[in-house]
Image (tube, grey):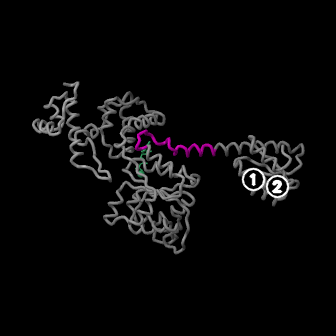
Amino acid sequence: MAPDATEALKVIASERVDLVLCDIQMPGINGLELVRQIHELEPDLPCIVMTGYNTPEKSLEALKAGAFWYLEKPFEQERLDVVRQLVEKAVEHGRLKSENRHLQHQLRSRHKFDSFIGKSSSLGRTLALVEKIADTESTVLITGESGTGKELVARALHYNSRRAERPLVTVNCGAIPETLLESELFGHVKGAFTSAVSHREGRFALAHGGTIFLDEIGDMSPNLQVKLLRVLQERTFEQVGSSKTQKVDVRVIAATHQNLHKLIEGGRFREDLFYRLNVLPVEVPPLRERIEDLPLLVHHFLDYARQERGARVQGVTDEAMQRLMDYHWPGNVRELENLTERLTILVGEGDIELEDLPAQILAEPITQAWAPRVPSTGLDFNAVVGRFESELIEQALAHTHWNKNRAAGLLGLNRTTLIEKIKKRGVTPPEDDT
Ligand SMILES: Nc1ncnc2c1ncn2[C@@H]1O[C@H](COP(=O)(O)OP(=O)(O)O)[C@@H](O)[C@H]1O
Ligand SMILES: [Mg+2]
């Protein structure tokens, strides 16, 4: 019970309230204004407005103000049942609304950072950056090999920004034929081209107020790159076949697995567009550079298969896990996810064993042990190659307990070459092995 609107707002701010019944005519703030203010505090709280004498205009006004319904006073005995039912319905409605909001929130938080599996420092650095820049309006360029989680990053950026309740619209620029991409992005008017039988909104318009994610931006044609540059600079565009300029409020996130610097050198990507996109660069590291995350990912995908598909696979033997960690994963997390899914079906029950792994993974360590990378700061070629050689030789000798014949076999070298290299690199047996 509250004598006026001001008191009512105090109660609502401090207690849990399921429903508000209020008069329209009250001292101070009137009932309709009260409903508006209540919804700023508690958007899901249902309000029923009571009127002295009901007119269609009044009831419409009440609904417009956000009331759940309106009731005419006084409540005579024979109408009490109607009032009761209305109250029950309103409370139920409020409960569903807040439950829905809660579920929506949960759904969104699935795109928060716990959807990223991994505890490597390189993934950690990427996620810390993503968290820092999520709630800004700046354009983000996500780079990384395919399957590393670029789309996951884009989602995390959107769902952790103030635009989270507005749409996230994804366009895969590589998957849509060039001729269609322009109308896909900007829309078209009826008759703009032969197949344009009706007017169509583009993805930029659909993303208004939210975020547009332009995936595989490196595949965009030079012609469209010019148009995109203009949207980034002026936030305006025209539909295909129209000369009317539209304004749009979107945040742009772009991603590519390609090396844009190379594309720029080759004249296939505009340098000015690159700088417009690359305001906040995020690099997602390849799986082979955070291989310590692999066991966690495997278990995550196995758990998922058990929960969602009733798979009965138990785990992975140490030997098989080690081999998975030796592989170089050109398709990154996606390749691992697909492989795990296939294995859960093929293996059926028990553990995934070494023999269950596909041939390319079993063959891997022979040809591709390690893919070196040249950091942008440069490196000392001879020193790196020397260290690499020493490392391989030491490992082969450790495997064979310093049997040089067998070590040479493991490395595919002949014995004399190995002995020369042992001397040249100064490789010596570990103390306790001699
Ligand atoms: N760190 C991660 N933890 C869990 N799943 C991941 C992770 N990174 C990627 N994935 C999964 O791998 C698949 C490929 O990721 P995606 O974002 O589509 O990669 P990209 O866009 O870089 O090609 C998706 O199913 C994604 O959910
Ligand atoms: Mg992708």
Could you say which is closer to the camera, residue 139 or residue 243? 139
Q: Give the left or right position of residue 173, taking residue 109 as reference.
A: left
Rendered image quadrant of residue 339 = top left
Q: Give the left or right position of residue 421, taking residue 383 as reference.
A: left
Task: Reply yes or no: does residue 69 show up in magenta.
Answer: no
The answer to whether residue 53 is above or below residue 112 is: below
Give coordinates of residue 146: x percent, y percent: 37, 50
Q: How packed is label 1: few (under 14 Cα within 10 Å), some, or many (20 or more)?
A: some
Q: Are marks 2 and 1 in contact (CB under 8 Å)?
A: yes
Give the number of the disc on residue 29: 2
- The answer to whether residue 198 is visible is no
Could you say which is closer to the camera, residue 386 or residue 65? 386
Give coordinates of residue 251: x percent, y percent: 52, 59
Spatial distance from mark 2 to mark 1, Cα to Cα? Answer: 10 Å
Which residue matches tag 1? Answer: 37
Magenta segment main secondary structure: helix
Rendered image quadrant of residue 407 = top left
The answer to whether residue 409 is above or below residue 90 is: above
Task: Residue at 67%, 46% (x, y): give it.
Answer: 97
- The answer to whether residue 434 is visible is yes
- What element does badge 1 sit on? helix
Magenta-highlighted residues: 100-123
Give coordinates of residue 42: x percent, y percent: 71, 47
Task: Name which residue type carries label 1.
Answer: Gln
Q: How packed is label 2: few (under 14 Cα within 10 Å), some, or many (20 or more)?
A: some
Task: Name which residue type carries label 2.
Answer: Ile
Give coordinates of residue 78: x percent, y percent: 88, 43
The answer to whether residue 175 is above or below residue 236 is: above
Rendered image quadrant of residue 270 = bottom left
Task: Residue at 31%, 30% (x, y): give it.
Answer: 319
